[in-house]
Amino acid sequence: MNMNTNSKEPITPLSTKEGQGSGSAYFNPEIETMTREQIEALQLERLQATVRAEAGITPDDIKTLADVRKLPFTTKQDLRETYPFGMSCVPMKDCVRLHSSSGTTGNPTVILHTKNDLDEWANQVARNLWMVGLRPDDVFQNSSGYGMFTGGLGFQYGAEKLGMLTVPAAAGNSLRQIKFIKDFGTTAIHAVPSYVTRLYEVMKEEGVDPRCDTKLKVLAIGAEPHSEEQRKRIEEMMGVKAYNSFGMSEMCGPGVGFECPEQNGMHFWEDYYIVEIVNPETLEPVPDGEIGELILTTLCREAMPLLRYRTRDLTRVLGRTCPCGRNHVRIDRMKGRSDDMMVLRGVNIFPIQIEKILMQFSELASNYLITLTTDEENDNMTVEVELDRPTDDYKQLQALEKEIRRRLKDEILLTPIVKLVSKGSLPVSEGKAVRVVDKRKVYQ
Ligand code: ADP
Ligand code: ZN
Protein backbone atom coordinates (compact mmCIF):
# COMPACT_ATOMS: atom_id res chain seq x y z
CA MET A 1 0.00 0.00 0.00
CA ASN A 2 1.02 3.53 -0.56
CA MET A 3 1.84 5.41 2.62
CA ASN A 4 2.44 9.07 2.76
CA THR A 5 4.82 10.80 5.07
CA ASN A 6 3.54 13.82 6.87
CA SER A 7 5.10 16.57 4.86
CA LYS A 8 4.76 19.14 7.66
CA GLU A 9 6.77 17.07 10.10
CA PRO A 10 9.87 15.77 8.41
CA ILE A 11 11.26 12.53 9.75
CA THR A 12 13.82 13.11 12.49
CA PRO A 13 17.21 13.39 10.86
CA LEU A 14 19.27 10.41 11.79
CA SER A 15 22.75 11.56 11.35
CA THR A 16 23.67 12.64 14.80
CA LYS A 17 27.34 11.98 15.21
CA GLU A 18 28.31 10.10 12.11
CA GLY A 19 31.96 9.62 11.38
CA GLN A 20 33.67 9.22 14.74
CA GLY A 21 37.40 9.41 15.19
CA SER A 22 39.30 6.42 13.86
CA GLY A 23 39.64 5.15 17.43
CA SER A 24 35.95 4.30 17.83
CA ALA A 25 34.64 0.87 16.96
CA TYR A 26 31.35 2.48 15.93
CA PHE A 27 30.47 4.84 13.11
CA ASN A 28 27.49 6.12 15.04
CA PRO A 29 27.97 4.94 18.65
CA GLU A 30 24.80 6.54 19.93
CA ILE A 31 22.59 4.58 17.53
CA GLU A 32 24.64 1.40 17.23
CA THR A 33 24.87 0.71 20.97
CA MET A 34 21.27 1.54 21.89
CA THR A 35 19.56 -0.80 24.32
CA ARG A 36 16.54 -2.80 23.14
CA GLU A 37 14.21 -0.37 24.94
CA GLN A 38 15.83 2.60 23.23
CA ILE A 39 15.66 0.92 19.82
CA GLU A 40 11.98 0.15 20.25
CA ALA A 41 11.12 3.65 21.46
CA LEU A 42 12.86 5.12 18.42
CA GLN A 43 11.12 2.68 16.10
CA LEU A 44 7.70 3.52 17.50
CA GLU A 45 8.33 7.24 17.09
CA ARG A 46 9.49 6.75 13.53
CA LEU A 47 6.70 4.35 12.62
CA GLN A 48 4.14 6.86 13.83
CA ALA A 49 5.82 9.53 11.73
CA THR A 50 5.75 7.27 8.67
CA VAL A 51 2.15 6.17 8.84
CA ARG A 52 -0.68 8.51 7.90
CA ALA A 53 -4.38 7.84 7.69
CA GLU A 54 -4.94 5.10 5.17
CA ALA A 55 -7.03 1.93 5.11
CA GLY A 56 -8.56 2.94 8.43
CA ILE A 57 -5.20 3.21 10.14
CA THR A 58 -4.19 6.51 11.69
CA PRO A 59 -1.02 7.21 13.65
CA ASP A 60 -3.21 7.02 16.78
CA ASP A 61 -3.81 3.34 16.08
CA ILE A 62 -0.07 2.75 16.33
CA LYS A 63 0.34 2.88 20.11
CA THR A 64 2.91 0.15 20.48
CA LEU A 65 5.40 -1.40 18.11
CA ALA A 66 3.28 -4.54 17.92
CA ASP A 67 0.59 -2.43 16.26
CA VAL A 68 2.68 -2.61 13.11
CA ARG A 69 0.81 -5.88 12.57
CA LYS A 70 -2.40 -3.94 12.03
CA LEU A 71 -0.90 -2.59 8.83
CA PRO A 72 -1.44 -4.38 5.54
CA PHE A 73 1.52 -5.90 3.69
CA THR A 74 3.09 -4.33 0.62
CA THR A 75 4.15 -6.65 -2.22
CA LYS A 76 6.28 -6.41 -5.32
CA GLN A 77 3.03 -6.62 -7.23
CA ASP A 78 1.88 -3.37 -5.59
CA LEU A 79 5.03 -1.70 -6.90
CA ARG A 80 4.43 -3.10 -10.38
CA GLU A 81 0.83 -1.98 -10.48
CA THR A 82 1.75 1.57 -9.54
CA TYR A 83 4.64 1.72 -12.05
CA PRO A 84 6.39 4.04 -12.47
CA PHE A 85 5.74 6.77 -9.88
CA GLY A 86 2.49 5.76 -8.20
CA MET A 87 4.12 4.95 -4.84
CA SER A 88 5.85 8.27 -4.54
CA CYS A 89 5.01 10.28 -1.41
CA VAL A 90 6.74 13.53 -2.31
CA PRO A 91 6.50 15.85 -5.30
CA MET A 92 8.66 14.67 -8.20
CA LYS A 93 10.77 17.82 -7.93
CA ASP A 94 12.05 16.54 -4.56
CA CYS A 95 13.27 13.24 -6.02
CA VAL A 96 16.85 13.14 -7.18
CA ARG A 97 17.32 9.52 -8.30
CA LEU A 98 15.49 6.36 -9.19
CA HIS A 99 16.60 2.77 -9.29
CA SER A 100 14.72 0.08 -11.10
CA SER A 101 14.87 -3.69 -10.85
CA SER A 102 14.93 -5.88 -13.91
CA GLY A 103 11.28 -6.92 -14.05
CA THR A 104 11.45 -10.18 -15.94
CA THR A 105 7.68 -10.46 -15.78
CA GLY A 106 5.60 -7.41 -16.59
CA ASN A 107 6.57 -3.97 -15.40
CA PRO A 108 9.84 -3.42 -13.60
CA THR A 109 9.71 -1.85 -10.15
CA VAL A 110 10.87 1.69 -9.53
CA ILE A 111 12.28 3.07 -6.30
CA LEU A 112 12.55 6.83 -5.88
CA HIS A 113 14.94 8.71 -3.63
CA THR A 114 15.12 12.22 -2.25
CA LYS A 115 18.43 13.85 -1.47
CA ASN A 116 17.91 12.94 2.18
CA ASP A 117 17.12 9.31 1.30
CA LEU A 118 20.45 9.08 -0.50
CA ASP A 119 22.28 10.62 2.48
CA GLU A 120 20.73 8.13 4.89
CA TRP A 121 21.49 5.26 2.53
CA ALA A 122 25.13 6.34 2.40
CA ASN A 123 25.16 6.47 6.21
CA GLN A 124 23.93 2.90 6.43
CA VAL A 125 26.60 1.63 4.07
CA ALA A 126 29.33 3.69 5.74
CA ARG A 127 28.27 2.33 9.12
CA ASN A 128 28.67 -1.21 7.82
CA LEU A 129 32.06 -0.65 6.31
CA TRP A 130 33.27 1.07 9.46
CA MET A 131 31.96 -1.86 11.51
CA VAL A 132 34.33 -4.26 9.76
CA GLY A 133 37.33 -2.08 10.39
CA LEU A 134 37.52 0.18 7.35
CA ARG A 135 38.70 3.74 7.95
CA PRO A 136 39.33 6.83 5.80
CA ASP A 137 42.87 5.69 4.96
CA ASP A 138 41.56 2.53 3.28
CA VAL A 139 41.22 2.05 -0.47
CA PHE A 140 37.85 0.62 -1.48
CA GLN A 141 37.37 -1.05 -4.84
CA ASN A 142 33.77 -1.58 -5.85
CA SER A 143 33.76 -4.50 -8.27
CA SER A 144 30.02 -4.75 -8.58
CA GLY A 145 27.78 -3.65 -11.43
CA TYR A 146 26.86 0.05 -11.53
CA GLY A 147 23.82 1.60 -13.15
CA MET A 148 20.40 0.45 -12.00
CA PHE A 149 21.93 -2.27 -9.81
CA THR A 150 22.10 -0.67 -6.38
CA GLY A 151 25.33 -2.44 -5.37
CA GLY A 152 27.25 0.06 -7.51
CA LEU A 153 26.15 3.52 -6.44
CA GLY A 154 25.07 2.27 -3.00
CA PHE A 155 28.56 1.18 -2.02
CA GLN A 156 30.11 4.09 -3.89
CA TYR A 157 28.31 6.74 -1.84
CA GLY A 158 28.75 4.80 1.40
CA ALA A 159 32.49 4.35 0.93
CA GLU A 160 32.88 8.02 0.03
CA LYS A 161 30.84 9.01 3.07
CA LEU A 162 33.24 7.04 5.25
CA GLY A 163 36.04 8.93 3.56
CA MET A 164 37.91 6.15 1.80
CA LEU A 165 39.60 6.50 -1.56
CA THR A 166 37.11 4.70 -3.78
CA VAL A 167 37.82 2.85 -7.00
CA PRO A 168 34.59 2.45 -9.00
CA ALA A 169 35.97 -0.48 -10.98
CA ALA A 170 32.50 -1.98 -11.73
CA ALA A 171 32.05 -5.65 -12.56
CA GLY A 172 34.13 -7.82 -14.87
CA ASN A 173 37.46 -7.42 -16.64
CA SER A 174 39.40 -9.33 -14.03
CA LEU A 175 42.86 -8.47 -15.37
CA ARG A 176 42.10 -4.80 -14.97
CA GLN A 177 40.64 -5.42 -11.51
CA ILE A 178 43.84 -7.16 -10.44
CA LYS A 179 45.98 -4.33 -11.81
CA PHE A 180 43.91 -1.80 -9.85
CA ILE A 181 44.16 -3.88 -6.69
CA LYS A 182 47.94 -3.94 -6.96
CA ASP A 183 48.59 -0.44 -8.28
CA PHE A 184 46.16 1.46 -6.06
CA GLY A 185 46.87 -0.58 -2.92
CA THR A 186 43.24 -1.68 -2.63
CA THR A 187 42.47 -2.82 0.92
CA ALA A 188 38.78 -3.66 0.52
CA ILE A 189 36.64 -5.05 -2.28
CA HIS A 190 32.90 -5.31 -2.66
CA ALA A 191 31.59 -7.88 -5.15
CA VAL A 192 29.03 -10.64 -5.50
CA PRO A 193 30.52 -13.85 -4.02
CA SER A 194 30.44 -15.71 -7.34
CA TYR A 195 32.59 -12.97 -8.85
CA VAL A 196 35.16 -13.12 -6.04
CA THR A 197 35.80 -16.78 -6.80
CA ARG A 198 36.24 -15.88 -10.48
CA LEU A 199 38.63 -13.08 -9.58
CA TYR A 200 40.67 -15.49 -7.50
CA GLU A 201 40.90 -17.95 -10.41
CA VAL A 202 42.30 -15.23 -12.63
CA MET A 203 44.74 -14.16 -9.90
CA LYS A 204 45.96 -17.74 -9.72
CA GLU A 205 46.41 -17.94 -13.49
CA GLU A 206 48.36 -14.67 -13.39
CA GLY A 207 50.57 -15.86 -10.55
CA VAL A 208 49.21 -13.24 -8.15
CA ASP A 209 48.94 -14.35 -4.54
CA PRO A 210 46.39 -12.14 -2.77
CA ARG A 211 48.10 -12.77 0.57
CA CYS A 212 51.53 -11.51 -0.48
CA ASP A 213 50.97 -9.42 -3.57
CA THR A 214 48.06 -7.24 -2.41
CA LYS A 215 47.11 -5.12 0.60
CA LEU A 216 43.64 -6.62 0.83
CA LYS A 217 42.17 -6.87 4.32
CA VAL A 218 38.38 -6.96 3.92
CA LEU A 219 35.83 -8.28 1.45
CA ALA A 220 32.16 -7.33 1.41
CA ILE A 221 30.16 -10.00 -0.36
CA GLY A 222 26.43 -10.04 -0.93
CA ALA A 223 23.49 -9.46 -3.26
CA GLU A 224 23.10 -13.19 -3.91
CA PRO A 225 22.57 -16.21 -1.68
CA HIS A 226 25.71 -18.05 -0.70
CA SER A 227 26.46 -20.74 1.84
CA GLU A 228 28.71 -20.51 4.88
CA GLU A 229 30.93 -23.05 3.08
CA GLN A 230 31.26 -20.73 0.08
CA ARG A 231 32.19 -17.85 2.38
CA LYS A 232 34.86 -19.94 4.12
CA ARG A 233 36.30 -20.87 0.76
CA ILE A 234 36.45 -17.25 -0.30
CA GLU A 235 38.19 -16.34 2.94
CA GLU A 236 40.75 -19.10 2.46
CA MET A 237 41.38 -18.17 -1.16
CA MET A 238 41.81 -14.47 -0.57
CA GLY A 239 43.37 -14.71 2.89
CA VAL A 240 41.01 -12.10 4.37
CA LYS A 241 37.65 -11.95 6.12
CA ALA A 242 34.57 -11.84 3.90
CA TYR A 243 31.50 -10.17 5.41
CA ASN A 244 27.97 -10.90 4.29
CA SER A 245 26.04 -7.86 3.09
CA PHE A 246 22.29 -7.85 2.55
CA GLY A 247 20.25 -5.34 0.64
CA MET A 248 17.47 -4.93 -1.84
CA SER A 249 16.45 -2.12 -4.17
CA GLU A 250 13.09 -1.67 -2.46
CA MET A 251 14.91 -0.92 0.83
CA CYS A 252 17.43 1.43 -0.93
CA GLY A 253 19.91 -1.27 -1.76
CA PRO A 254 22.95 -2.53 0.17
CA GLY A 255 23.22 -1.36 3.76
CA VAL A 256 20.12 -3.01 5.24
CA GLY A 257 22.08 -5.70 7.06
CA PHE A 258 25.76 -6.54 7.41
CA GLU A 259 27.92 -8.83 9.52
CA CYS A 260 30.02 -7.44 12.32
CA PRO A 261 33.48 -8.88 13.09
CA GLU A 262 31.79 -11.64 15.14
CA GLN A 263 30.30 -13.02 11.88
CA ASN A 264 27.34 -14.43 13.77
CA GLY A 265 24.56 -13.24 11.48
CA MET A 266 23.90 -9.86 9.93
CA HIS A 267 22.92 -6.88 12.06
CA PHE A 268 19.81 -5.41 10.48
CA TRP A 269 19.65 -1.72 11.33
CA GLU A 270 16.56 -1.26 13.39
CA ASP A 271 16.75 2.51 13.45
CA TYR A 272 16.03 2.33 9.71
CA TYR A 273 13.77 -0.75 9.51
CA ILE A 274 11.27 -2.75 11.49
CA VAL A 275 12.17 -6.39 10.97
CA GLU A 276 9.51 -9.10 11.17
CA ILE A 277 9.73 -12.78 10.27
CA VAL A 278 6.40 -14.37 9.38
CA ASN A 279 5.11 -17.71 8.22
CA PRO A 280 4.76 -17.15 4.44
CA GLU A 281 1.44 -18.98 4.33
CA THR A 282 -0.37 -17.77 7.44
CA LEU A 283 1.52 -14.46 7.56
CA GLU A 284 1.63 -14.81 11.34
CA PRO A 285 4.88 -14.03 13.18
CA VAL A 286 7.18 -16.97 13.88
CA PRO A 287 9.29 -17.27 17.05
CA ASP A 288 12.95 -16.25 17.00
CA GLY A 289 15.08 -19.04 15.55
CA GLU A 290 12.37 -20.27 13.21
CA ILE A 291 12.66 -19.74 9.46
CA GLY A 292 10.08 -17.55 7.76
CA GLU A 293 9.69 -14.71 5.31
CA LEU A 294 11.49 -11.48 6.04
CA ILE A 295 9.18 -8.47 6.23
CA LEU A 296 10.66 -4.98 6.33
CA THR A 297 9.11 -1.62 7.12
CA THR A 298 11.15 1.46 6.29
CA LEU A 299 11.36 4.06 9.05
CA CYS A 300 13.29 6.93 7.52
CA ARG A 301 12.35 7.06 3.88
CA GLU A 302 10.88 10.21 2.37
CA ALA A 303 10.27 9.47 -1.31
CA MET A 304 8.92 5.94 -0.98
CA PRO A 305 8.30 4.61 2.50
CA LEU A 306 7.20 0.97 2.39
CA LEU A 307 5.15 -0.69 5.09
CA ARG A 308 5.52 -4.39 5.83
CA TYR A 309 7.19 -5.16 2.54
CA ARG A 310 7.17 -8.86 1.69
CA THR A 311 10.75 -9.52 0.61
CA ARG A 312 10.13 -13.21 -0.20
CA ASP A 313 13.54 -13.90 1.37
CA LEU A 314 13.58 -16.75 3.85
CA THR A 315 15.66 -16.45 7.00
CA ARG A 316 15.41 -16.33 10.79
CA VAL A 317 16.31 -14.25 13.83
CA LEU A 318 19.53 -15.46 15.49
CA GLY A 319 19.57 -13.08 18.44
CA ARG A 320 19.16 -9.54 19.66
CA THR A 321 22.42 -8.98 21.48
CA CYS A 322 26.00 -9.39 20.32
CA PRO A 323 29.47 -9.34 21.89
CA CYS A 324 30.28 -6.42 19.55
CA GLY A 325 28.01 -4.20 21.66
CA ARG A 326 25.34 -3.72 18.99
CA ASN A 327 21.83 -4.77 19.94
CA HIS A 328 20.36 -4.48 16.46
CA VAL A 329 18.75 -7.79 15.54
CA ARG A 330 21.01 -10.52 14.12
CA ILE A 331 19.56 -12.21 11.03
CA ASP A 332 20.81 -15.50 9.57
CA ARG A 333 22.18 -15.71 6.04
CA MET A 334 19.35 -16.01 3.53
CA LYS A 335 18.19 -19.49 2.75
CA GLY A 336 16.96 -18.18 -0.59
CA ARG A 337 13.87 -16.50 -1.93
CA SER A 338 10.61 -18.38 -1.76
CA ASP A 339 10.57 -18.26 -5.57
CA ASP A 340 14.06 -19.87 -5.76
CA MET A 341 12.67 -23.01 -4.23
CA MET A 342 12.67 -25.96 -6.61
CA VAL A 343 9.95 -28.53 -6.22
CA LEU A 344 11.15 -31.80 -7.66
CA ARG A 345 9.04 -34.90 -7.33
CA GLY A 346 7.28 -33.28 -4.42
CA VAL A 347 10.47 -32.41 -2.54
CA ASN A 348 11.31 -28.77 -1.78
CA ILE A 349 14.94 -27.91 -2.49
CA PHE A 350 16.91 -24.67 -2.28
CA PRO A 351 20.01 -24.23 -4.47
CA ILE A 352 21.97 -23.22 -1.38
CA GLN A 353 21.55 -26.74 0.07
CA ILE A 354 23.35 -28.13 -2.96
CA GLU A 355 26.07 -25.50 -2.80
CA LYS A 356 26.69 -26.27 0.86
CA ILE A 357 27.54 -29.89 0.01
CA LEU A 358 29.59 -29.17 -3.12
CA MET A 359 31.76 -26.64 -1.31
CA GLN A 360 32.83 -29.29 1.18
CA PHE A 361 34.79 -31.14 -1.51
CA SER A 362 38.29 -29.76 -1.96
CA GLU A 363 38.46 -31.49 -5.37
CA LEU A 364 35.73 -29.15 -6.64
CA ALA A 365 36.00 -25.54 -7.78
CA SER A 366 33.31 -23.00 -6.89
CA ASN A 367 31.19 -22.79 -10.03
CA TYR A 368 28.22 -25.09 -10.43
CA LEU A 369 24.95 -25.26 -12.36
CA ILE A 370 21.73 -27.07 -11.55
CA THR A 371 19.57 -28.09 -14.53
CA LEU A 372 16.07 -29.46 -14.18
CA THR A 373 14.70 -31.53 -17.05
CA THR A 374 11.80 -33.82 -17.81
CA ASP A 375 12.76 -37.22 -19.09
CA GLU A 376 9.64 -39.08 -20.26
CA GLU A 377 7.38 -38.59 -17.25
CA ASN A 378 10.02 -37.95 -14.61
CA ASP A 379 11.63 -34.73 -13.51
CA ASN A 380 15.37 -34.94 -13.05
CA MET A 381 18.08 -32.81 -11.61
CA THR A 382 21.57 -32.62 -13.03
CA VAL A 383 24.29 -30.95 -11.01
CA GLU A 384 27.29 -29.90 -13.06
CA VAL A 385 30.27 -28.77 -11.07
CA GLU A 386 33.75 -27.72 -12.09
CA LEU A 387 36.78 -29.69 -10.96
CA ASP A 388 39.46 -27.70 -9.24
CA ARG A 389 42.32 -29.57 -10.97
CA PRO A 390 42.36 -31.50 -14.23
CA THR A 391 42.70 -35.25 -13.86
CA ASP A 392 42.40 -38.26 -16.13
CA ASP A 393 42.17 -40.77 -13.33
CA TYR A 394 38.80 -42.14 -14.38
CA LYS A 395 38.40 -44.42 -11.36
CA GLN A 396 39.01 -41.57 -8.98
CA LEU A 397 36.50 -39.37 -10.80
CA GLN A 398 33.87 -42.08 -10.64
CA ALA A 399 34.42 -42.51 -6.93
CA LEU A 400 34.20 -38.77 -6.42
CA GLU A 401 30.94 -38.52 -8.39
CA LYS A 402 29.49 -41.32 -6.35
CA GLU A 403 30.43 -39.72 -3.07
CA ILE A 404 28.95 -36.34 -4.16
CA ARG A 405 25.72 -38.07 -5.15
CA ARG A 406 25.54 -39.80 -1.80
CA ARG A 407 26.10 -36.62 0.18
CA LEU A 408 23.59 -34.70 -1.93
CA LYS A 409 21.02 -37.39 -1.35
CA ASP A 410 21.49 -37.08 2.41
CA GLU A 411 20.81 -33.35 2.13
CA ILE A 412 18.02 -33.09 -0.47
CA LEU A 413 16.55 -36.62 -0.27
CA LEU A 414 16.84 -37.13 -4.04
CA THR A 415 19.74 -38.49 -6.04
CA PRO A 416 20.68 -36.06 -8.78
CA ILE A 417 22.84 -36.81 -11.81
CA VAL A 418 26.30 -35.42 -11.06
CA LYS A 419 28.62 -34.31 -13.84
CA LEU A 420 32.18 -33.26 -13.13
CA VAL A 421 33.33 -30.78 -15.74
CA SER A 422 36.60 -29.01 -16.32
CA LYS A 423 37.30 -25.63 -14.84
CA GLY A 424 36.04 -22.68 -16.86
CA SER A 425 33.48 -24.71 -18.79
CA LEU A 426 30.35 -23.49 -17.01
CA PRO A 427 28.94 -20.04 -17.77
CA VAL A 428 29.91 -17.12 -15.52
CA SER A 429 27.77 -14.04 -15.23
CA GLU A 430 29.08 -10.59 -14.39
CA GLY A 431 26.19 -9.89 -12.06
CA LYS A 432 24.35 -12.29 -9.82
CA ALA A 433 25.14 -15.92 -10.61
CA VAL A 434 22.50 -17.99 -12.40
CA ARG A 435 22.52 -21.29 -10.51
CA VAL A 436 19.39 -22.99 -11.80
CA VAL A 437 18.13 -23.64 -15.32
CA ASP A 438 14.64 -25.11 -15.38
CA LYS A 439 13.90 -26.92 -18.65
CA ARG A 440 11.06 -29.03 -17.31
CA LYS A 441 7.93 -29.56 -19.30
CA VAL A 442 4.97 -28.03 -17.59
CA TYR A 443 1.97 -30.34 -17.43
CA GLN A 444 -1.34 -28.58 -17.14
P1 ADP B 1 16.57 -8.17 -7.95
O1 ADP B 1 15.28 -8.31 -7.19
O2 ADP B 1 16.38 -7.77 -9.39
O3 ADP B 1 17.52 -9.31 -7.74
P2 ADP B 1 17.92 -6.57 -5.94
O4 ADP B 1 19.32 -6.20 -6.21
O5 ADP B 1 17.08 -5.59 -5.25
O6 ADP B 1 17.26 -6.89 -7.32
O7 ADP B 1 17.95 -7.94 -5.16
C1 ADP B 1 17.60 -8.06 -3.82
C2 ADP B 1 17.58 -9.51 -3.48
O8 ADP B 1 18.88 -10.08 -3.57
C3 ADP B 1 17.15 -9.81 -2.07
O9 ADP B 1 15.75 -9.79 -1.95
C4 ADP B 1 17.75 -11.19 -1.85
O10 ADP B 1 16.94 -12.19 -2.43
C5 ADP B 1 19.04 -11.12 -2.61
N1 ADP B 1 20.15 -10.80 -1.71
C6 ADP B 1 20.70 -9.60 -1.47
N2 ADP B 1 21.72 -9.69 -0.59
C7 ADP B 1 21.81 -11.00 -0.24
C8 ADP B 1 22.65 -11.74 0.64
N3 ADP B 1 23.61 -11.17 1.34
N4 ADP B 1 22.42 -13.06 0.74
C9 ADP B 1 21.44 -13.66 0.04
N5 ADP B 1 20.63 -13.03 -0.80
C10 ADP B 1 20.80 -11.70 -0.95
ZN1 ZN C 1 27.77 -7.79 16.34
Image (tube, rainbow, N blue to C red):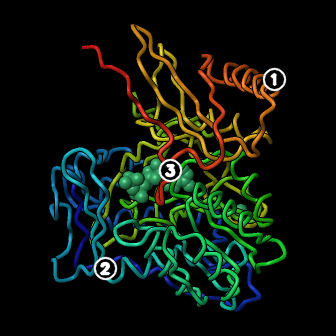
Q: Amino acid at mark 2?
A: Pro
Q: Nearer the viewer, residue 258 or 66?
A: 258
Q: Position of residue 16 (x, y in %)?
A: 53, 85
Residue lying at the far front in this picture: please name it: 392
In the image, which is nearer the foreground, mark 2 or mark 1?
Answer: 1
Instruction: Rate crowding at label 1 as few (under 14), some (14 to 19) or many (20 or more) other CA atoms within 10 Å.
Output: few
Secondary structure beneath dot 2 equals loop
Residue 384's quadrant in the figure?
top right
Amino acid type of the residue tagged 3 in the rendering: Ala
The answer to whether residue 347 is seen in the rendering is: yes
Q: Residue at x 76, y 74 (%)?
A: 217
Left/right of residue 243 with respect to residue 155 in the rendered view: right
Q: Earlier in the sequence, mark 3 or mark 1?
A: 1
When asked about the image quadrant of residue 389, the answer is: top right
Ligand 1 lies under 8 Å from the Cβ of mark 3 = no
Check residue 135 in the rendering and tell me which mark sits there, or answer none.
none
- Dot label at residue 433: 3
Circle 1 residue: 395
In the image, residue 315 above or below residue 325: above
The numbered mark at residue 10 is 2
Between 124 and 347, the one lying in front of the other is 347
Q: CA distance from mark 3 to mark 1?
A: 31 Å
